[in-house]
Image: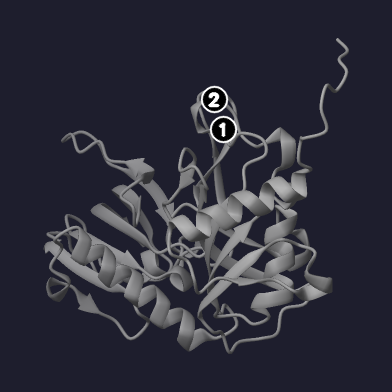
Amino acid sequence: MASCRKSGNDVDIKTYDTNQIKDYIAANGLSAMKRDTVGGDTSGIYYQITRPGHGAALNYDTRISFSYTIKSLDGRYAVTDTITARSYNAVGLIAPKGLMMVIHDVVKNKGTSARFLIPSRLGYGVSGSGVGTSRLPGNASLDYTVNILDNDNTAAMAAYDDLSIRNYCAANNINISSYTKKASGLYIRVTQAGTGTTAVTSTSTVNVQYLGYLLNNNVFGQYDDQSSTNVGTALNMPDLVAGFQEGLLGLTGGAKVDLLIPSNLAYGSLVRNTTNAAGQTVVSIPTYSCLRYGINLVSVTN
């Protein structure tokens, strides 16, 4: 198809983005937003640092982990679950381009929390992103909140994980005082004493039934058929994440235990993927995830 322009009143995309963002700032009272002036004030990005970071300086090859939320300025597209919306990547490989630019040019340090308004031309452009009902349409400017973890700082990460676990318990009416907190940061609650005679050691083979949850209550792993004839699935202790191992040590067959595991005792910076029914690879455990396990220790072999 071909057409000819009948008037010259159409604005270019830079002007369109600028108008959309300025109207959004005014409508939502975002007077604290500052315009990114790196490179001569050409990006059109606006930002607000909500918590300055004091961790390592960010270069393009610095690997960072961050949680985030996104919404389009019209509110029709939103990603708000920061348990699943997490990323671990080098700064220079972060998408979209606008997010990479503002993290490198404005954030500058690990441990920073910030809010960004990113114009569509530095977001996902005219093509948008995604499929189906969750698709982000083209020419959509974006409102991001980003929390960059100081993943080099062991104490800071331990505090972040512990706060995440406590917030999860508060939100789900879980009495955290019913758990014993270990020096490692693991929370453990034995809900049923074991009846066996063989205790779990660091080299045991354990038969277990379990449910594994993210802290948004999404189930990422399951072997929970608790029929009387089910002996569980056999797992070798050295193959398990550190928190799972520590939670079972010393227990005997017949014990039931609930574990709240900080990310450093789980999979840390690694991402665990699974394949869905359509054959697509999906993230089952995002980077730096705290985990909850409900475990029935069926039997122990040493």
Q: Secondary structure at mark 1?
A: loop
Q: Which mark is residue 132?
A: 2
Give neighbour class at mark 1: few <14, some 14-19, many 20+ (Cα, 10 Å): few
Q: Amino acid at mark 1?
A: Arg
> Quadrant of the rendered structure where residue 41 is?
bottom right
Q: Amino acid at mark 2?
A: Gly
Q: Position of 29 compared to 217: left or right?
A: right
Q: Which mark is residue 146?
A: none
Q: Can the viewer see residue 59? A: yes
Q: CA distance from mark 2 to mark 1?
A: 6 Å
Pointer 2 with pointer 1, Cβ within 8 A: yes
**Colour approach in the figure:** one colour
Q: Which residue is painted at 42% across and 81% down in the image?
A: 158
Q: Which residue is painted at 58% across and 89% down in the image?
A: 54
Q: Which mark is residue 135?
A: 1
Q: Position of 22 compared to 43: left or right?
A: left
Q: Secondary structure at mark 2?
A: helix
Picture coordinates of residue 43 (x, y %)? 76, 62
> Quadrant of the rendered structure where residue 237 is?
bottom left
> Quadrant of the rendered structure where residue 252 is?
bottom left
